[in-house]
Image: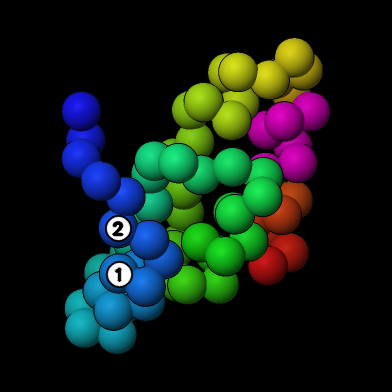
Amino acid sequence: DAGDAVGTQLITEIKKALDVPAVAIGGITADNIAQVAKAGADCVAVISAVIGADDVEAAARCLIRKFLNA
């Protein structure tokens, strides 16, 4: 168990404090990936939202589009 989610505010705080790439993982879905990107994540690692989809390719393409267009 990875513990409790920390939310997008921590991404913003890390990006302000450190000059390092921020990778977000855990709980990322098509509904919240734009918020993650806007918070400053440089990239994301998504598992359940892709693997759990009926159409894995479509789910991945949707997530990529939403992240890049945020």
Q: Report whether 36 appears left or right of 61.
A: left
Q: Give the vertical position of 44 relative to 57 (above or below).
A: below
Q: Report whether 62 appears left or right of 35.
A: right
Residue 10, disc: 1
Would you say residue 61 sits in the magenta stretch?
yes
Which residue of the protein is positioned furthest toward the bottom in this rendering?
A: 16
Marks 2 and 1: in contact by CB < 8 Å? Answer: yes
Q: Position of residue 22 (x, y in %)?
A: 34, 61
Q: Position of residue 39 (x, y in %)?
A: 47, 72
Image point (31%, 50%), residue name: 5
Q: Which residue is mark 2?
A: 6
Q: Nearer the viewer, residue 26 or 37?
A: 26
Q: Position of residue 33 (x, y in %)?
A: 59, 54
Task: Name the kind of residue labelled 2 in the image.
Answer: Val
Q: Secondary structure at mark 2?
A: loop
Q: Give the vertical position of 24 relative to 16 (above or below).
A: above
